[in-house]
Structure formats: structure tokens, C-alpha cells
Amino acid sequence: MKKLLFGINPIHMDIAALALRIILGALFIYHGATKIASFNEMFDQFPDLIGIGSGATLVIVILAEFGGGILVLTGLITRLAVIPIFITMVVAFFVVHASDPFQAKELALVYMILSVIVFLVGSGKYSIDRFIMKGQ
């Protein structure tokens, strides 16, 4: 018990990766779903940050958040799926909320950091990626 509580080795890295994927994926599915639900209201008001129109930008963000969230949650191409999430959070933190107080952009920073951690940890044993990569 002493080694378990005070040891430096991970207890179970694959379960930690699964929990992290489930949490991050579910949160982004939720954020993407809220954007889908209010798509018509947000369509003309969403910031056009890359010059393609606010509607097209909103669609890209929905794909990153909702689609990426599903892929991360299931562990399908996890490292690739988390890249658009990371980019979305970088833009949210450094561009959209640049002049806002820290409390307004804190969540974007947390999501940005969590996406980097998911990228570094990978999908783990309990994922679709494992079954795809099993033969390699």
C-alpha cells in the first residue's frame, strides 16, 4: 500500500489515458453540440478569424469540437484528432479572448493543456487505435 500511495510509478497508465480521453472528448462533444443547437443564431455572429466568413469558421470549429470530441472519446486517431482541438483552443485563448480578463479565457487554456497531454499520452490500450495498430 505504501508503494501505491507514495511510489513514483504510474498505477495504471492505460486507465488514466482512458479517463482523460473520456473527459476531454465528452467536454468537447458538449461544446460542439451547443454550437450545433444554436447554429442559426451563431452563424452571422461568430468571429471570422481567418477570412472565410463567420459561418464557415463556425462549421470548422464545430467539426474540431464535436467531431474531434467523438474521435478522442472513442480513441480513434486520437493524436490526429486532438490537433484541431488544440488549434481551436489556441485561437480562443490568444485571439478571441486576447483582451479579456484571465477568468474569461482560463477554460480555453485548460483545454489547450489537456489536449497537449492527450497528444503526449496517446489513446492507450482501451481504444479503437489499439485494435487498428494491433498488427503493427
Image (cartoon, grey):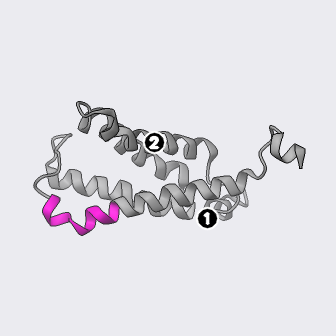
Residue 115 position within the rendered picture, expressed as x and y whole percent measured from the top left: 49, 45
Crowdedness near tag 1: few (<14), some (14–19) or many (≥20) residues, C-alpha within 10 Å: some
| Residue name at image x 38 percent, y 39 percent | 106
Q: Nearer the viewer, residue 79 or 92?
A: 92
Residue 107 position within the rendered picture, expressed as x and y whole percent measured from the top left: 39, 44
Q: Amino acid at mark 1?
A: Ile
Q: For numbered disc 1, what is the local secondary structure? A: helix
Q: Which residues are magenta?
A: 32-42
| Residue named by callout 1 | 128
- Residue 17, numbered label: none
Relative to residue 81, is residue 100 depicted above or below?
A: above
Q: Residue furthest bottom?
A: 37
Residue 56 position within the rendered picture, expressed as x and y whole percent measured from the top left: 19, 54
What secondary structure do most residues of the magenta stretch adopt? helix
- Closest to the camera, between mark 1 and mark 2, is 2
Residue 58 position within the rendered picture, expressed as x and y whole percent measured from the top left: 23, 54
Left or right: 57 as drawn, with respect to 113? left
| Residue named by callout 2 | 110
Q: Quadrant of the C terminus?
A: bottom right
Q: Does the magenta portion include 70?
A: no
Q: Amino acid at mark 2?
A: Val
Q: Quadrant of residue 120?
A: top right
